[in-house]
Amino acid sequence: MDYGVKYNILRSLEQRGCTILLLPANTDSATISKLEPHGLFLSNGPGDPAAVTYAVETIRAQIGERPIFGICLGHQLVGLALGGKTFKLKFGHRGANQPVKDLLREKWKSLHRITGFAWTSSRSTIRTSN
């Protein structure tokens, strides 16, 4: 779903064998279900994720129907769809590499992040990956 996707992300997915069908941000869940995609990719984009309420409802309806991958804004929208809350970061992450530990695999990665928002949830059943 296109919330302001960077086209290099689409090219990278295509180079890895993904078939891409770019849907507008306001596509509803019933339309997505009719298309029967193998997965749902939620793109990056600008702004406050709490303002994109129409996307949250669509994502919530798709949870459990297919794998969902969100990057930047898309990841924050998944958090909202799972009942989380977003908040504005005081300074944000602006291009610095961030060390992140994969708790399941006990490995460290270095991630490049550019975001002004984050999300949190009190539900212990939610597992996120990087």
Image: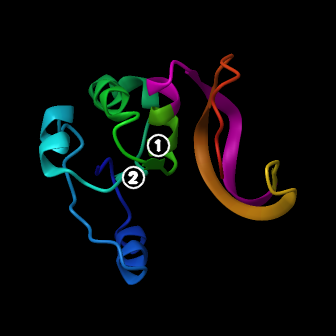
Tell me what residue is drawn at x 36 percent, y 45 percent. Answer: 66
Question: How far apart in space, not on screen, are marks 1 and 2 (Cα)?
Answer: 7 Å
34 lies above or below 43: above
Dividing the picture into quadrants, the one containing residue 61 is top left
Q: From the top left corner, tell me how far across and down residue 34 is, in percent.
A: 12, 44
Could you tell me which residue is drawn at 43 percent across and 77 percent down? 12
* Residue 116 x %, y %: 59, 39
**Residue 73: numbered disc:** 1
Q: Do tag 1 and tag 2 residues touch (Cβ < 8 Å)? A: yes
Looking at the rendered structure, the number of numbered marks drawn on it comes to: 2
In the figure, 83 relative to 71: above or below?
A: above
Instruction: Tell me if mark 2 has few (under 14), some (14-19) or many (20+) residues whose alpha carbon lies within 10 angstroms of its own.
Output: many
Quarter holding residue 65: top left
N-term mark: 1 or 2: 2
Q: Which residue is mark 2?
A: 43
Q: Residue at x 84, y 61 (%)?
A: 108
Please name the residue shown 40% across and 48% down the image.
45
User: SS of the residue at dot 1?
Assistant: helix
Q: Which residues are magenta?
A: 79-99
Residue occupying the far bottom of the picture:
15
Tell me the element at label 2: loop
Question: Does the magenta portion include 38?
Answer: no
